[in-house]
């Protein structure tokens, strides 16, 4: 049996799903080339959990996958150092905000007249409703 130490990481699962989404217009080999991997098999190894994504490759990989860099870095960081250490890094440096999340923040600022509203239980309930929770 082949050892796959990163198989159950969110990054491996996300990479597999994203490659499937891009399949109609971009091959896995093309993704690997755009990400700067000399060996196109590296994408397969990360996707299958045999290898972890090198943090210095995340920006190019995010561009190749056409995904948000901050989101992919969060997943890669967790994979690289583990959930507890990644949480400590985020606590120290702050949570990376994705472009989509930034859009939400800007919408809240516009809707509130830049009043820095507190997240009330009513507002939280409204957000939960938006996401069906």
Image: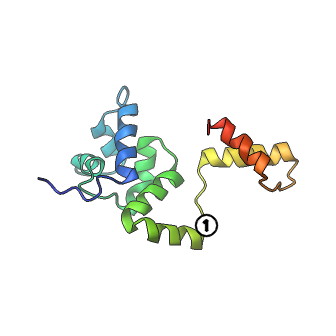
Q: Is residue 11 above or below residue 93?
A: above
User: Disc 1 marks which residue?
Assistant: 94
Q: Is residue 71 left or right of residue 34?
A: right
Q: How is the image coloured?
A: rainbow
Query: Residue visible at 38% across and 27% down?
Result: 25
Examine the image and state in which quarter residue 6 appears: bottom left
Question: Percent from the top left, x then y, of residue 119?
Answer: 77, 54
Q: How dense is the environment of label 1, judged by Cα within 10 Å: few (below 14), some, or many (20 and up)?
A: few
Along the line of sight, the residue nearer the viewer: 73 or 63 = 73
Query: Residue visible at 47% across and 67% down?
Result: 86
Question: Percent from the top left, x then y, of residue 57?
Answer: 38, 57
Q: Is residue 102 above or below residue 129?
A: below
As helix, strand or loop, the secondary structure at mark 1 comes to: loop
Question: Percent from the top left, x then y, of residue 16?
Answer: 34, 41
> In which quadrant will I find the C terminus?
top right
Residue most extreme to the left: 1
Counting every numbered tag in the picture gives 1
Q: Is residue 122 left or right of residue 38?
A: right
Q: Is residue 39 left or right of residue 109?
A: left
Query: Residue visible at 67% across and 36% down?
Result: 130
Question: Percent from the top left, x then y, of residue 36?
Answer: 33, 51
Q: Is residue 93 above or below residue 10?
A: below
């Amino acid at each position: 049996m082949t050892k796959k130490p990163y198989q159950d990481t969110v990054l491996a699962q996300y990479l597999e799903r994203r490659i499937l989404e891009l399949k109609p217009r971009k091959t896995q080999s093309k993704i690997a080339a755009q990400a700067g991997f000399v060996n196109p098999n590296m994408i397969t190894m990360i996707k299958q959990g045999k290898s972890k994504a090198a943090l210095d490759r995340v920006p190019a990989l995010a561009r190749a996958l056409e995904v948000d860099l901050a989101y992919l870095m969060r997943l890669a960081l967790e994979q690289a150092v583990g959930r507890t250490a990644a949480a400590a890094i985020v606590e120290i440096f702050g949570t990376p905000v994705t472009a989509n999340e930034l859009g939400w923040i800007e919408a809240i600022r516009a809707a509130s007249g830049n009043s820095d509203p507190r997240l009330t239980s009513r507002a939280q309930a409204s957000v939960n409703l938006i996401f069906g929770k």
